[in-house]
Image: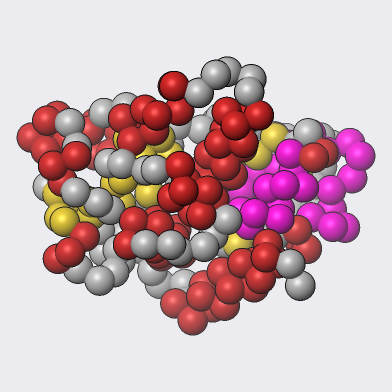
Amino acid sequence: MDRSQLVDLVVKELMRRLGPELSSSGGDVLVAGEVSDLPDGYRRSLSLVPCSDCVSPGGFLAVLVPRLSMGQLVMASLGVPQDPVTSLILDGLVSGVPVMVTREALGWMGGLRPGSPLANHYRACLDRLMSFGVRVVGGPEEVATPGECRVAPAEPMEARSPQGSGDVLDLRGIRVVSERDLKDRLTEGVRCILVDPRAIVTPLCGDLLRTRGVELRRGDGV
């Protein structure tokens, strides 16, 4: 069993144990890192709680990451908790709490030469992390309305089928989407899969979609 398959199994077991009732209902935002690392706009506009004051992201409006290093990005994209920041990112995803990374947290990516192997590597890591449901936000107003995800909107379909119809495969209703969910459904004609806004897409599933050139789209659940 490789690392991706192990992460897949661990995530599914966590979801089974935590149960279907987990949701974020509070108005506070949990900061995965130092509050002082956030720009002034976030500190003025949001009710922020330092991660040292709690042990679980459950019940928070969102988890907000003010700084994400190269190593933290890589480990979080692999689903491996390395430190308090990566642990909170993954705990938030498992708990169904929106996880957001500020644009400033990834400012170091702007210093990488576009198209270089290193830049492509970190871009792939970020894409994988975002396929889990993590969002990159540019201001506090995007954190205050976590339900308004900046993803491609679901196009109306006259005939929807959970097994897939035409070039769209509808997997809404599946909380953790893994490679096994795609094996018998991802036919040659499928160009896009549709999942719930908070669905977790495992690393192995994300790799398969990128290899096949299939778009991942998040839309309203059924």
Q: Nearer the viewer, residue 63 or 156?
A: 63
Frontmost residue, 72 versus 41: 72
Can you name the residue that lies furthest to the bottom here?
A: 17
Tell me if residue 196 comes above or below residue 125 in the rendering: below
Task: Answer above or below: position of 169 versus 25.
Answer: above
The answer to whether residue 171 is seen in the rendering is no
Q: Is residue 58 left or right of residue 211?
A: left
The residue located at (61%, 67%) in the rendering is: 7
Q: Quadrant of the N terminus?
A: bottom right
Side of 59 relative to 117 (left or right): left
Q: Is residue 191 magenta?
A: yes
Q: Residues in magenta?
A: 182-210
Q: Residue at x 64, y 20 (%)?
A: 115
x, y percentage for residue 56?
29, 69
**Which residue is painted at 47% across and 72% down in the image?**
20
Judged from this view, the residue extending furthest toward the right is: 188
- The residue positioned 12% from the left and 30% from the top of the image is 40
Q: Is residue 208 left or right of residue 51?
A: right
**x and y percentages locating residue 103 in the rendered image:** 35, 30
Residue 214: in sight, yes or no?
Answer: yes
Q: Is residue 84 above or below residue 129?
A: below
Residue 60 vs residue 70, the one in the foreground: 70
Specify the farthest residue to the top.
Answer: 114
Model colouring: secondary structure
| Residue 150 lies within the magenta run | no
